[in-house]
Image: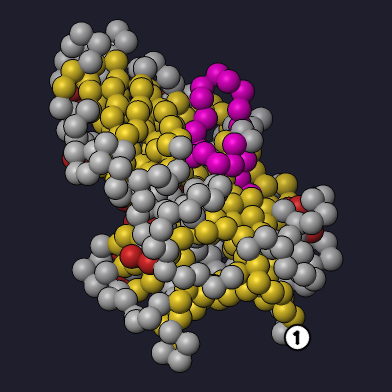
Amino acid sequence: MTINHVKQRLYSMRRIVFILLSCCLCIAAMAQHRVFAPDVKTLTVVAGNDWLSPPVLTMGDGEVLSIAFDRMSHEYQQYTYHVEHCEADWTSSNELFEVDWLQGFNDQPIEDYEASVNTTVPYIHYRLSIPNELTQLKLSGNYRLSIIDEEGETSAEVRFMVLEEIMPLSLTVTTNTDIDVNNSHQQLSMSVGYNGQNVTRPQEQIYTVVTQNQQWERAVVNPAPDGLSNGGKGLAWNHVRALIFDAGNEYHKFETLSTSHPTMGIDRMEWDGEAYNAYPFENELRRNYLYDEDADGAFYIRNSDNWENDVTSDYVRVNYCLHCPHPMDGTLFVNGTWTTDASNPNTYAMTYDETDHCYHAAIWQKQGYYNYQYVLRRPDGTQTTTPAEGSFYQTENRYQAYVYYRSNTGRTWHLVGYRQIIFK
């Protein structure tokens, strides 16, 4: 066994431990990325300049994946990154050698960093791009990038995809569903063509994943197709029950552009002697649909000066409040693509106050624009958006579909089709 294989096994074992701990603690973080170190915050992962979409790179188009995070101290810590290729289900690609998918070097230091400037909360901002001069990727598929600290512990984990678009994929969304018509659901239909690829056993060679608003914890994995497309040279999903989604409601949103006065969605800003506190307007039960342009759970770091946002944006304590006449049966969480902290199961959890009949949560967040919603984890472990959010067929949602292919003699799954559609 080579040294690289030993390293990959060690990293895999470490990640398994993290996953098991996360499951045992019922961690509330609901994004595909994870932060395991309590002193690491605001993990951002953007392909190209599209902060609204999943981190998907297309082979040959020259785009890069930009990864950034903050360490909450002005004391420098050295980090390295380790990349590995994964299967369609995100398990490690054990049948591949590193040389099969990597050109260059792995386990490189992150050398682009900068201390915060004029902030009440000190931090060092780290940046990393993939591919770079030392590390290039040769195969399509899923990739996991681990950020390793000086002690050899995984501080954060990023998941991204590399697309080799060789199978055409089409998506449509309708509110005329097999459950109801123009009520509270949206139904996705899709088709994929083999495009000359040798597919003789589609149930074993084609693997699909569908998400709504990048919510990987509720991804629909490998729904069974109900027909053929392209004259029998493809698959179709037209009336598949698994592809009927609760329409939900538009996300709540706010901006903390200034620490001196409230901006969009903020009722007031306060200084408590130690930190700035932002108070978004109290949320109420939403009985009717009201259109409000949002970013479907995404976030963007910026401040009112909009200059060197990465290092001049301060951290504020955001105080969420949801009015609810009675406590719900389960645990309530604040959720968005930014809820990546897996170091503490209570980071995004809310507590119910019998005095004011409200759920409350106080979360440290970097200045910027944020979308969020409230999700409920029931006692049986299942989770959904809270009844207080409502579900309305008019809701704008983003749907993502991923198609993976493995040839009869292949040793791994390749991402060969990807499409995102926005229902408006």
Indicate the quadrant containing the N terminus: top left, top right, bottom left or bottom right.
Answer: top left
Q: Is residue 239 magenta?
A: no
| Viewer-proximal residue among 35 and 134 | 35
Please, is residue 327 above or below residue 47 in the view? Answer: below
Camera sees residue 338: no
Could you say where residue 185 lies in the image, as x and y percent from the top left? Answer: 29, 46
| Viewer-proximal residue among 386 and 5 | 386
Q: Which residues are magenta?
A: 50-73
Q: Residue at x 40, y 44 (%)?
A: 394
Q: Secondary structure at mark 1?
A: loop
Mark 1 sits on what residue? Answer: 273
* 308 sits to left or right of 275: right
In which quarter of the view is residue 163 placed? Answer: top left
Image coloring type: secondary structure
In which quarter of the view is residue 328 placed? Answer: bottom left
Residue furthest out toward the bottom: 355
Q: Residue at x 45, y 76 (%)?
A: 323
Q: Residue at x 41, y 89 (%)?
A: 354
Q: Amino acid at mark 1?
A: Gly
Could you say where residue 396 lies in the image, as x and y percent from the top left? Answer: 45, 43
Q: Residue at x 50, y 63 (%)?
A: 341
Q: Is residue 63 magenta?
A: yes
* 312 sits to left or right of 255: right
Local packing at callout 1 (Cα closer than 10 Å; few below 14, some 14-19, many 20+) is: few
Could you say where residue 48 lies in the image, as x and y percent from the top left? Answer: 61, 33
| Viewer-proximal residue among 279 and 133 | 279
In which quarter of the view is residue 327 placed? Answer: bottom left
Please, is residue 255 above or below residue 355 in the view? Answer: above
Please tell me how many numbered marks the rendered image carries.
1
* 108 sits to left or right of 367: left
Could you say where residue 288 lies in the image, as x and y percent from the top left? Answer: 41, 58
Camera sees residue 167: yes
